[in-house]
Image (cartoon, helix red, strand yellow):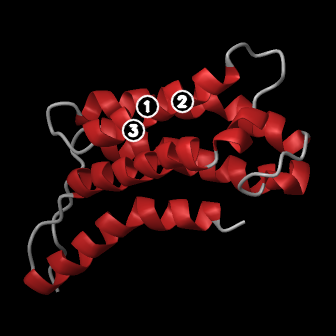
């Protein structure tokens, strides 16, 4: 069940490192910039799962879903495209909006996998996995919306 922890570390590391550097230098922290980077790294990590754990990802979809293997590869490509776009200032806000949509649209696959104890990334724990996955999903959506989509995401360094 280390996957959620890995995701949180990937998501928060760029912002945490930038925060440390801003404290040392006494400079302004560009929250939005590093929030985009963390989300981008997380989405690239998600896309890797579509290649490395393809069969497990296919099992996460109900049998009635057509072209499951192709769908896994296509969604992996979508996730890597989102991840890369989150590093390009011109596309960042749009990519973050698409990321929110993707996180919402893909969530039923996580529910199906957890309820059916699909053995991938903690889903083998069954519905208990949703107790971890659901808050993580909300964290990812909140991160994308509040730190990446909304404007004025720069924080001034605090004076001592």
Q: Position of residue 22 (x, y in %)?
A: 16, 75
Q: Does dot 2 land on a helix, a strand or a loop?
A: helix
Q: Position of residue 125 (x, y in %)?
A: 87, 57
Residue ID at (62%, 30%):
106
Residue ID at (16%, 64%):
156
Marks 2 and 1, how far apart at CA: 6 Å
* Residue 73: mark in rendering: 2
Q: How many marks?
A: 3
* Residue 134: mark in rendering: none
**Residue toward you, 77 or 122:** 77
Residue ID at (64%, 48%):
53
* Residue 77: mark in rendering: 1
User: Which quadrant of the structure image shows residue 144?
Assistant: top left
Marks 2 and 3, how far apart at CA: 11 Å
Q: Position of residue 25 (x, y in %)?
A: 8, 82
Residue 97 in the image: above or below residue 49: above
10 Å crowding of disc 1: few (<14), some (14-19), many (20+): some
User: Which quadrant of the structure image shows residue 114?
Assistant: top right
The answer to whether any part of residue 25 appears in the image is yes
In contact (CB < 8 Å): disc 3 and disc 1:
yes
The answer to whether any part of residue 60 appears in the image is no
10 Å crowding of disc 3: few (<14), some (14-19), many (20+): many
Residue ID at (73%, 30%):
108
- Residue at numbered disc 3: 80
In contact (CB < 8 Å): disc 2 and disc 1:
yes
Horizontally, residue 104 falls left or right of residue 61, namely: left
Nearest to N terminus: mark 2 or mark 3:
2
Residue 51 in the image: above or below residue 78: below
Horizontally, residue 69 falls left or right of residue 8, namely: right
Q: Does dot 3 land on a helix, a strand or a loop?
A: helix
Quarter holding the C terminus is: bottom left
Q: Position of residue 51 (x, y in %)?
A: 54, 43
């Amino acid at each position: 069940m280390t996957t959620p922890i890995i995701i949180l570390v990937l998501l928060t590391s760029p912002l945490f490192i930038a925060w440390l550097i801003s404290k040392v230098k006494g400079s302004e922290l560009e929250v939005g910039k590093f929030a985009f980077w963390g989300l981008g790294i997380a989405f690239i990590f998600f896309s890797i799962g579509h290649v490395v754990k393809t069969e497990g990802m296919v099992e996460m979809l109900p049998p009635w879903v057509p072209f499951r293997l192709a769908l896994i590869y296509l969604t992996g490509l979508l996730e890597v495209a989102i991840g890369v776009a989150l590093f390009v200032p011109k596309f960042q806000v749009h990519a973050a909006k698409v990321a929110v949509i993707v996180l919402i649209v893909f969530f039923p696959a996580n529910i199906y996998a957890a309820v059916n104890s699909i053995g991938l990334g903690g889903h083998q724990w069954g519905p208990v996995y949703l107790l971890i996955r659901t808050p993580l999903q909300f964290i990812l959506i909140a991160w994308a919306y509040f730190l990446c989509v909304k404007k004025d995401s720069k924080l001034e360094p605090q004076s001592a």
